[in-house]
Every structure is written in structure tokens, then in C-alpha cells.
Image: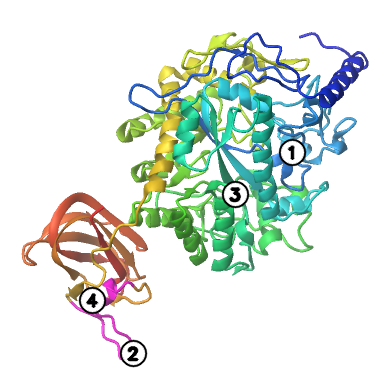
Amino acid sequence: MTRHSHRKRRPIAVLSLLLAVVAMVLGPVPSSSAESDWWTPAARPAPDSQINVTGEPFKGTDPQGEVRGFVDAHNHLMSNEAFGGRLICGKTFSELGVADALKDCPEHYPDGSLAIFDFITKGGDGKHDPNGWPTFKDWPAHDSLTHQQNYYAWVERAWRGGQRVLVNDLVTNGVICSVYFFKDRSCDEMTSIRLQAQKTYDMQAFIDKMYGGPGKGWFRIVTDSAQARQVAQQGKLAVVLGVETSEPFGCKQILDIAQCGKDDIDRGLDELHKLGVRSMFLCHKFDNALCGVRFDEGTLGTAINVGQFLSTGTFWKTEKCTGPQHDNPIGIASAPNAEKELPQGVKVPSYAADAQCNTRGLTELGEYAVRGMMQRKMMLEIDHMSVKAAGRAFDIFESESYPGVISSHSWMDLNWTERVYRLGGFVAQYMHGAEGFSAEAKRTDALRDKYNVGYGYGTDMNGVGGWPGPRGADTPNPVRYPFRSADGSAVIDRQTTGERTWDINTDGAAHYGLVPDWLEDIRIVGGKGVVDDLFRGAESYLDTWGASENHKAGVNLAAGSSASASSSEWSLFTSYAPDSAVDGNAGTRWASDWSDDQWLRIDLGAPSLIKRVTLNWERAHGKAYRIELSTDGTNWQSLWSTTTGDGGLDTAQFTGTSARYVRVHGLQRGTTWGYSLNEVGVYSS
């Protein structure tokens, strides 16, 4: 592409703006495309971005009745409205046209000298050409984290390239907003979430208008999995609302004291559900009143730890991990720009290299929120939760056989992957470069085969994460334009907006419109098998969502049953009788003598099909124990056992077996005390 001087470009820019004004006065003009079918708008604002895709978007399902297409499980369409409104520059759409949508923040003019966040995230001096439309000299770019990457026409190109589900995570952070120099609105997180939700509905209306009215556009916000399937089968894009914020419902904690209660959580979940939100993170970046977070590393980790202190009054606290999973190492990298925000005399602590787990897990309020999400059939985003918090959330879901768990952008310990699949959950990988993405996809390929699931990607566009850079014009296996989409229905050429044309080989994943190009790069580098798994992603995501909606709490066969035990601890003031473990009250418990080889026996009263037993241990838990079943109370069959019990909430699942009696047989104690169970649940499902 020929580069012109700034002086010579100005008449073109002025002309473009005049055309935009004319377009505003006269309304949208007919598309100049030769296509005139349902996927082409009757009118589009002029001037505007090109799509550079030809061919009808595929409709319907495969021969097995499964939805076809890709899923982006983690994107931020409206984060330009977050963080005080001036952290991400440019808009996803504008009624005033592309020149208004794709322009830089005011303080970035004339040369980016005051682009503080750009300097912080990208390095250098932060200087750049602030002009967006029509030249786009310096942005959007794969390494520019402060400029709009989700312009509606670029999202349209991704849809035309085969994407059928997009999760729009409404995102913000009150502390980042409060300390950033430039803002034009409130830093209240829930206020921002409401605004971003409204803007997403406004974007739907904006696109509908091009196609002739409400419901006619390709961008369809959905609130249940059946709607999503209908949209995908029409060949359109199903958009799901999620939430990723650090202190939802005002649930921050200050000096370890929660600033919210159960009523706040109920009101917040009800409001989000009414807005159309169906998945969410309970914590993000900072520990809050609900859960501890999975740390960030290096300089960024230090900066966020400063934010943690400014928000909560405490720094992250670490401990040695008790299992193979661990949180990210924090390290001791300096972050001078952030550290100067600390009060005089306060310093970021150092951390032991062998202590990589957050001491903070899922709080009592956090457990209440998890169960509240289950009641509302919402999906929990497990990424960003500390190992301790995620482990407890898994325990709760497994005890209820609830499948609604999502890892959308590679921010959980990868050792959890099979646990997600076993529940029926969904996993997507962050939008890494083709080589890294393909290698990780192949590493987990056997698991996807085992559980017969597809795969997803999380672009995290507008999420300040960084995106795949170019592999280079001289790479021996470049993307060759034009190319066909994964299903073969579309022909995709280089993307052009204004005077700029992007090429994945030399520009990397600079904006959302290059998602199809990135997928082609993955096909070339990783092979067709990786892309085939991704093409099954929409179906698997909708499977998880649908199973969450259809989940029914199982009937606890043990509730109110008679129970006996090998022994019971004696107390003058409290009863630790066996029936306390089946009375439906988590505040009571059965406790044995302080020795091994103890058991608790439950008589269900009649033979029943048993597939699952849940154990809610008090601190005195079993390290090695068996679940045994019997039809007569004399002859016992061991159906499940462990030698690595760690207390908390355990779930034993096994092949359905008919029995009247259930016995928890403790073989080795996990503490110096006996065995103690708050509640035992027995289920047929």
C-alpha cells in the first residue's frame, strides 16, 4: 500500500467526514455490493468499512443435527464504555458513522504524548498517530491495547467467516477507573455493566436498521440455548451476555470484611439475569468478598497487587499448594508507576517461590453466589478464580451434577481441564499465535475425543491482553489470499477499512475482522483437525448451556433416613449422633471416636438405584475411605474409594447400583481427630 504524507491525506479525511455528514442527513445508502441476498444489508452507512467476504453464510446443522460453527467464548464488545470511558478509545458502532466510531481519545492528540495507558501497556513513549478513519496508520494493531478492535463491520466479517456464537463479557474495574487520569463518567462497576448491556442492545438495533427493521439483522442477542440454536441455524450470530468485573454487586472486601450481604447478591443476580446475562466471573484481578483470585505475574502482577491494596487494604497472601494445581507465581518485578500510588512507607511484599497458591478461596458469600447462579441456571466462569476457590466451586457443582462451568480464555490451571469436561462444561483457549494455539489444542485433543466435545477460542479483544503478532511475509507457509472459509461457503480476501488493508502474515491479529484469517493460519500451521474441533465449538458451548438450563436438583434419598455408626463422640452439650449427618442441617454433624476403621451406615428404607454420594466433611475428614452398598445390611460391595481425601465437599460417582444401605467406611483419618460429616447425600442421578 502506498503511504501518503499527513498533509496530502487531509483532503481525503475532510472529504470522508463530509460524506459521513451527508450520510447522517440523508440516512443510510444502498450497499454498493453486487450481492443482494439476505446477508447483505439493504442500506449501510457510507462511507464504511469493507467486509471483503463473498458467499452466502451457511445455515442449518450437520447430518447429526449439530450446530456448525465457531464460538468466541470471551470478548469485550463494549469495554470502551468501561474504566471511566477513556481507557479504550473508539466505539464499536456509531449512528454518526465510521469516522465518529473509529477515532482516538481526545488526550491522544496530536501525537499520543498523553496516551498514558498506551505507554503502560505497550512500552516505548506511547506516541502514535492518533488518526483512525480513514488512514489507520498505527491502530488498530495486535500490540495496541488501547484502541477499538471490535468495530461492528469487523465483527460482521468474523460472522461471515463461520463464527456462530459470541460471548460479550461486560467488563470494568472500579480501581483502575479511579486511578486513571482521564475519565468522563462514574467508576461504579454495576453502573458500567448496565450501560454496556444497553449498548449491546443498541448495537443490535443499529444493525437491524440496516436490514429493514427489528429482528432482521445478523447480530442476535439470545437469552437461552434454544434461541441460540435457532439463530445459528438461520446462519446468524448468537450473542450471549456475560460479566467479568472485580467487585460484582458491590461485593468488595476491605481489611477482610465483606461490604455486601446475601440480599445484595440476590438482587444483583436477579438484575443481571433480567438484563440477559447468562454467564459470569465472581472475581477478577482483585480478591473480593466472594473469592480469591488467580494471580497475575511479573510487572503486571505487581501493578495489580498495588490495585488490590488500594481496593481492599490488603496485598495478596500466598501459601504452599496442597495439590498439583497452583496459581501464577507473583514474582518481585518492579512496577514503579503503580507503586508510587501506595501510601508513604507501604511496600509490595515479597513472596516465597514455593508458595504459589492464594490463601483466599471461595467465601461463605461466594458459595451463596455459586448456588444462586445454579438456581438461575447461569454458567460460572472458572477463570481468574484462585485454585482454592475453583476447587470448592468444582466440589459444589459435582455434588449437584451441575454442568455449567466455563473456562473461556486459558486463565485456570490446565490440570482442571478434565474436571471441566467430566462435569459437562466447556473449554476455550486464549487467542494465542497459530503455533502456540495449535500445540495446546493438540495436547488436549485426546480429552476432547474422550468426552466427544468441540473446542473454542477466547479472543479477549478490547481486553488489554495482546494478540497474535505476524509470522512474517517470509514465512514458508503463509496465509494465501483469497482463501475459503472452513466450511467452504465463503471466499475471504484481505480486509480493508478506509485507506488501510490488513494482512495476517504481516499485521497479525490487529482487529476482530482478522479472526477468519487467524483461523486459516491455524489450519495451515496446526492442520485441519484443530480447525474441525473449533468448528464443533458452537455446538459444545450450547450443549453446556442447555444442560445447565435443564438441570434439576436431585432428590436426596438419605434425607431423614435412619443412620447408625461404629461410634459417636460424646459431649455433654452437643449431640454427634449418626442421624445428624442426614437431618438436612449443615450446622449439625456426626463425629466418630478418634481412631481409624470407623463407619457411618444409612438405611434408605427400601432398595433404590444409587449413582452418586456426596460427603460434606467437617475439618475432621477422611483421607482414605470407601463408599459401600448393601441390599441386606450384612454383605457389602465397595463401589468407590480414595486414599487422597482432603476434606471439604466430596462427590463419589459410580455405575448405578440398586441397594438399601449405604456405608461410608473410614480407613485413615486426615487429622488427629476422628471422622466427622455434616451431611451425606445419596442420589439416583
Residue where numbered disc 3 is placed? 275
C-alpha span from label 4 to label 1: 59 Å
Which residue is under mark 2? Answer: 573
| Front of the two marks 2 and 3 | 3
Name the one closer to the observer, 295 or 33.
33
Residue type marked 4: Pro
Which circle, 4 or 3, is nearer the viewer?
Answer: 3
Where does residue 97 sit, x and y in percent of width and height?
78, 27
**Residue visible at 30% across and 34% down?**
450
In the structure shown, which secondary structural element does the residue marked by tag 3 occupy?
helix
Q: Is residue 328 visible?
A: no
User: Element type at marker 2?
Assistant: loop
Helix, strand, or loop for circle 4?
helix
Residue 361 location, x and y as percent?
A: 49, 60
Which of pointers 2 and 4 lies earlier in the amino acid sequence?
A: 2
Q: CA distance from mark 1 to mark 2?
A: 61 Å
Q: Which residue is depicted at the point 61% across and 28% down?
A: 217
Q: Earlier in the sequence, mark 1 or mark 2?
A: 1
Helix, strand or loop for disc 1 = loop
Question: Dominant secondary structure of the magenta stretch?
Answer: loop
Q: Amino acid at mark 3?
A: Leu
205 left or right of 488 in image: right
Direction from residue 222 to residue 451 in the image, left or right: left
Quarter assignment of residue 264: bottom right
- Judging by the rendered image, the residue that carries numbered circle 1 is 88
Is residue 566 on the magenta stretch? no
Of badges 1 and 2, nearer the viewer stands: 1
